[in-house]
């Protein structure tokens, strides 16, 4: 079985660069019952894969704990520079081909030299959730986060990570899988925006073709506006027709009663 070649880390602020053919970072690092991490499986995985060293993060969290920090969430939210300090203590050891493709990097060195463009903005807030999970002693963590390609394109991602067996005490080997869910999240945001717009449109209707005021709580309008985004384009005319017809019926009934 071939394993990913070892690496020597060389400091390259604010992150780290990688050189090959030294000691092995994956030697004796087993996954769930499948033995050593296989280089072909890692390289050919259909999702972005990262091998990282979180030992610096563990030391930082241990320091804060010893200093009396008990509520990590509040501590980090009070000063996001502390979250950024944690990211600076993460060492990227290896990534696969899908990662280079997804983040538009030429090679590993190119990606590492530009990690400041990848991890920024919204990512700091979601990184708090990841830190909380390992702070609580979990060996696996996940989050919905935002990254950016080197050209600046936003990526919505689903991250799932595991501290590899044998490294639970120092977190020096963490395997991360990053799935690009941008298309799904973009569709969800679009659907939500359309639904809100159509609901506002239904609520703003005040008068039907018969001249009657239409309640914003019209059951026909509310029911139609609650439909899925795939059918929401039909909401407005349906709301108007249903409400107008109801108003017309009320008008006819009222007229008939008055004549009696």
Image: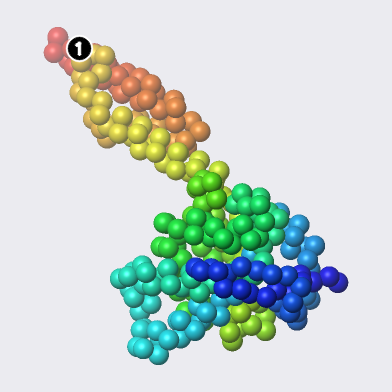
Quarter of the rendering containing residue 175: bottom right
The image shows residue 215 at horizontal and vertical percentages of 23, 30
Quarter of the rendering containing residue 81: bottom left
| Horizontal relation, residue 64 to residue 87: left or right | left
In the orientation shown, which residue stands out farthest toward the bottom? Answer: 66
Which scheme is used to colour this image of the protein?
A: rainbow
Answer whether residue 204 is visible to the viewer in this image.
Answer: yes
Which residue position is annotated with label 1? 256
Q: Residue at x 80, y 62 (%)?
A: 40
Q: Residue at x 40, y 90 (%)?
A: 66
Answer whether residue 174 is visible to the viewer in this image.
Answer: no
User: Element type at marker 1?
Assistant: helix
243 w.r.t. 17: above or below: above
The mark total stands at 1
- Observer-nearest of 47 and 98: 98
Quarter of the rendering containing residue 207: top left
| Horizontal relation, residue 248 to residue 144: left or right | left
| Horizontal relation, residue 96 to residue 61: left or right | right
44 w.r.t. 215: above or below: below
In the orientation shown, which residue stands out farthest toward the top? Answer: 259
> Badge 1: how crowded within 10 Å, few (<14), some, or many (20+)?
few
The image shows residue 20 at horizontal and vertical percentages of 73, 70
The image shows residue 100 at horizontal and vertical percentages of 65, 54
- Observer-nearest of 192 and 93: 93
The image shows residue 178 at horizontal and vertical percentages of 60, 59
Q: Quadrant of the C terminus?
A: top left
- Observer-nearest of 39 and 129: 39
Q: Residue at x 51, y 69 (%)?
A: 13
Q: Residue at x 76, y 57 (%)?
A: 44
- Observer-nearest of 39 and 248: 39
Q: Quadrant of the N terminus?
A: bottom right
């Amino acid at each position: 079985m071939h394993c990913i070649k070892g690496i020597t880390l060389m400091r390259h602020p604010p992150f780290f660069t990688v050189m090959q053919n030294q000691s092995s970072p994956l030697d004796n690092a087993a996954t769930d019952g499948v033995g050593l991490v296989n280089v072909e499986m890692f390289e050919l995985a259909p999702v972005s894969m990262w091998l990282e060293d979180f030992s610096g993060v563990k030391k930082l969290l241990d320091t804060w704990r010893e200093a009396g920090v008990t509520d990590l969430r509040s501590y980090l939210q009070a000063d996001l520079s502390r979250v950024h300090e944690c990211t600076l203590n993460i060492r990227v050891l290896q990534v696969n081909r899908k990662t280079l493709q997804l983040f538009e990097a030429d090679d590993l060195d190119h990606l590492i030299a530009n990690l400041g463009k990848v991890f920024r903005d919204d990512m700091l807030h979601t990184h708090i959730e990841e830190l909380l999970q390992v702070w609580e002693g979990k060996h696996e963590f996940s989050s919905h986060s935002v990254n950016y390609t080197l050209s600046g394109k936003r990526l919505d991602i689903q991250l799932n990570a595991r501290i590899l067996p044998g490294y639970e005490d120092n977190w020096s080997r963490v395997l991360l899988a990053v799935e690009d869910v941008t298309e799904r999240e973009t569709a969800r945001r679009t659907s939500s925006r359309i639904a809100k717009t159509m609901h506002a449109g239904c609520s703003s209707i005040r008068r039907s073709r018969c001249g009657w005021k239409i309640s914003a709580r019209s059951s026909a309008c509310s029911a139609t506006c609650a439909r899925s985004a795939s059918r929401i384009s039909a909401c407005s005319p349906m709301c108007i027709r249903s409400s107008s017809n109801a108003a017309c019926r009320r008008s006819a009934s009222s007229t008939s009663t008055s004549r009696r």
